[in-house]
Amino acid sequence: MTHSLDRILAQGAMLHDSGRYHEALALYDQYAQIFQNSEYFWNNRANTLLELGLHQQASESYRHALLLAPGLDVARVALASCLQSLGEYQEALVECETVLAHSPNNAEAHWNRSLLLLLDGHYREGWLEYEWRWKKQRFTSPRREYPQPLWSGEEIHGKTLLIHAEQGLGDTIQFCRYLPLLVQRGASIIFECHTPLTGLMRTLGNGITPVPFGSPLPRFDLHLPLLSLPLILNTTLATIPASIPYLKPPSDKTAFWRSIIPCDRQKKIGVCWAGKTYPDPGRSCPPELLNGLTSQTAAGWYSLQADSALPAPHGIIDLSSQLLDFSDTAAMLVMLDLIVTIDTSVAHLAGALGKDTLLMLPFSADWRWLTGRRDSPWYPTMKIFRQPSAGDWPAVIADIGNHLQSSGIT
């Protein structure tokens, strides 16, 4: 029986790792009665359910595994992720703290706990926990090692700091707002960031030198990852640096896009409906639903999808072939009256530019949007439209449609 269990677990893992999740689930369900007393069987089945986005079923499978083996921390941490996706945030926090009570160095539990604290607006403790990101498995950015020390908040007047971006483009756009604050303290900043952002980051102001990843670095005295700045600078909900705009398009890009988009009296709305499936496959809105918006307004609708492989829905003007980098995207956004977007880099760029923005969020959204709010303390010109239940994009579209009508954009 042990050999058979090992064989089924290995076969299921092979299907799972190959992305053949439905086949893996069918295999597990076929043997569920035979191996009902194996915690590893139920944990692996839950992992597959989690990849399929079946969070309720996954949580039940993880709970089965934990009934058999309460100390199976990997299952309890994953259960916390499921509960967060289901909107059961306090329950998720309890699961993380249960793990940490006996495994205080469990990086995965600390990471999940940080996201839950930040989601609930507990920023002081949340930022501290967020530092565990460098010890979790498969973190999206490598840890940078230099002979120069990490900056820990000491006096930096006359010093040169290397701030290195991490994670995604949206993270960089959101948190680059902190760099001028360092310049105000008398520091010179070298900002290592994604190549498509370097032109835009030059507009942050004097004292900040953007350098694309992989390029030779000038001399510096101290360094720090970008998303550690809120911790070092003691950011709370009340002290978020939210003066906008803190970015602007270069003047040559603005002139180009002024020649592309007509300067007439018609309202112009930019729309972005899809983003990368990892790490959040549920954040993209089915493009056919946008027809309900474009058909009810006399506005001109413009695609903000940088990926030209995604055809624009009917009635949406596609100028994506002209978007060479984020300087172009910023200049295009400046020409528009309103931005409608999912949670992606376009949302952060629109907010950083101070554009009126309608943000479409899934039921369980990323930590930076908090919970239950229709506004964002990070972006004062943004309004948030959330799914009332998982996957309910039609309700979001209807809510935005009502907003457009009440705002006179018809």
Image (spheres, grey):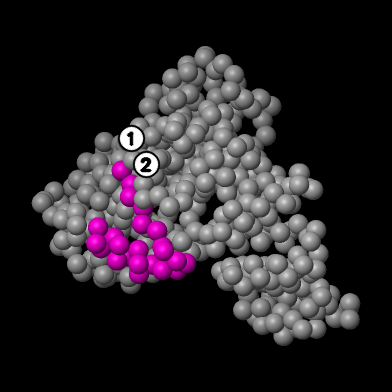
234 or 311: nearer the eye? 234
Identity, as a three-letter code, of the amino acid under mark 1: Ile
Identity, as a three-letter code, of the amino acid under mark 2: Tyr
Q: Secondary structure at mark 1?
A: loop
258 or 377: nearer the eye? 377
The answer to whether mark 1 and mark 2 are in CB contact below 8 A is yes
Residue 303 x, y percent position in the rendering: 30, 59
Q: Residue at x 19, y 54 (%)?
A: 407
Quick check: can you spot residue 110?
yes
Q: Is residue 393 magenta?
A: yes
Lower sequence index among marks 1 and 2: 1
Q: Is residue 290 magenta?
A: no
**Would you say 12 lies left or right of 198 here?**
right
Total number of numbered discs in the rendering: 2
Is residue 163 placed above or below 328 in the rendered structure? above
Judging by the rendered image, the residue that carries numbered circle 1 is 244
Distance between the alpha carbons at the discs numbered 1 and 2: 8 Å
Quadrant in the rendering for residue 272: bottom left
Is residue 35 placed above or below 200 in the rendered structure? below
Q: Which residues are magenta?
A: 381-403
Q: Residue at x 64, y 27 (%)?
A: 150
Q: Secondary structure at mark 2?
A: loop
Residue 379 badge: 2
145 or 372: nearer the eye? 372
Residue 183 x, y percent position in the rendering: 45, 22
Residue 202 x, y percent position in the rendering: 39, 32
Looking at the rendered image, the quarter that the N terminus falls into is: bottom right
Could you classify mark 1 by the number of other residues whose Cα lies within 10 Å: few (under 14), some (14-19), or many (20 or more)?
some
Could you classify mark 2 by the number of other residues whose Cα lies within 10 Å: few (under 14), some (14-19), or many (20 or more)?
many
